[in-house]
Amino acid sequence: MRILTAGVALAALLLAAPLAKAADPIVIKFSHVVAENTPKGQMANKFRDLVDQRLGGKVKVEVFPNSQLYGDNKVLEAMLLGDVHLAAPSLSKFGKYTKKLQIFDLPFLFKDIDAVDRFQKSPAGKSLLKSMERRGLIGLGYLHNGTKQLSASKPLRVPGDAAGLKFRIQASHVLAAQFEAINATPLKKPFSEVFTLLQTKAIDGQENTWSNIYSKKFFEVQEYITESNHGVIDYLIVTSTEFWKSLPSDVRAQIQEAMDEAVAFGNQVALQKAINDKKRIAESGRSKILQLTDAERQEWIKAMRPVWSKFEDEVGKEMIEAAVASNAGS
Ligand code: LMR
């Protein structure tokens, strides 16, 4: 009888053994298109490290920078298929999934990045994080990069200087309308192709932040950069609703917490890079940075501002009002 009991106990132990083996960690693939020495690149690496410290063994984050895994034009499809779990495309790249985020592309809407920040933290801004839930995507937060500058192979001081030139744009109807408003030709191209397009003179110019112009060396193949601050490149950190809901709730909460901390870190990096990368470009002597007079800046505003009314129905009048209201403040 005792032998039998011992045998049963042993069998139970052997059966239980495989169950006791540690479960495989949840793998989160985070794909992005920029270099590691950018606000987004730094945020992604910080997030990976925080998750490793706090959830190591349970959750593993793998970061793929520089469009290594997917370009921004493919990443959202891949996310819906479950092939990648996190991305942070620029807010200009969600047009297939929602028209609401187009608000961030309206030229001369925000007076500076603090105004963008206030809007993103407002109830109106926060509601946009959920604007794609019906399509299976959920925003976990915003991340800053900075305001956009215009670079070109010739000096751009007034809108007429850009007439007839070809500009690469992100895949956004608003950005297309913005360049059409100044009689230029917009071309929607992936970020990964911009340097070569500029180098080979297949295009004449592009618009981007100081950190992207610096880290991707656009300043080496563009003779002029106009400090126009006419728009913004910020990001939506996005995941699939299905993946997000599949996570155990305690893990989900810890991931969100790590993400919020990584974003705060990335935003600091963004502020520094907007200053330092501009300085590095100026010091390189490769590109001449042009400042606009007030009168010249007014001309750009006058030429581009009519774009707002074209998108008012899609974006929502009240949303635009909320964004404008965010300009009031320190
Ligand atoms: C671009 O395509 O110019 C940017 O959206 C790249 C990025 O992610 O900052």
Image (tube, rainbow, N blue to C red):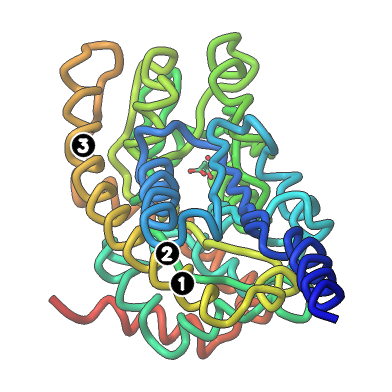
* Number of the label disc, if any, that sits on residue 291: 3
Q: Disc 1, disc 3: CB below 8 Å?
A: no
Q: Quadrant of the C terminus?
A: bottom left
Secondary structure of the residue carrying numbered label 2: helix
Secondary element type, mark 1: helix
The CA distance from mark 2 to mark 1 is 5 Å
Nearer to us in this view, 267 or 328: 267
Q: Position of residue 178 (x, y in %)?
A: 56, 52
Please name the residue shown 46% across and 72% down the image: 256
- Residue type marked 1: Gln
Q: Position of residue 234 (x, y in %)?
A: 44, 56
Residue nearest the viewer, comparing 188 with 69: 69
User: Can residue 208 be seen at all in this image of the molecule?
Assistant: yes
Q: Are marks 2 and 1 in contact (CB under 8 Å)?
A: yes
Q: Residue furthest left?
A: 330
In terms of sequence position, does the residue under pointer 2 or pointer 3 come before the other? 2
Name the residue type under label 2. Answer: Met
Q: Is mark 1 within 8 Å of ligand 1?
A: no
Q: CA distance from mark 1 to mark 3?
A: 40 Å
**Which residue position is annotated with label 1?**
256
User: Disc number at residue 259?
Assistant: 2
State which quarter of the image contains the N terminus: bottom right
Residue kind at label 3, given as amino acid type:
Gln
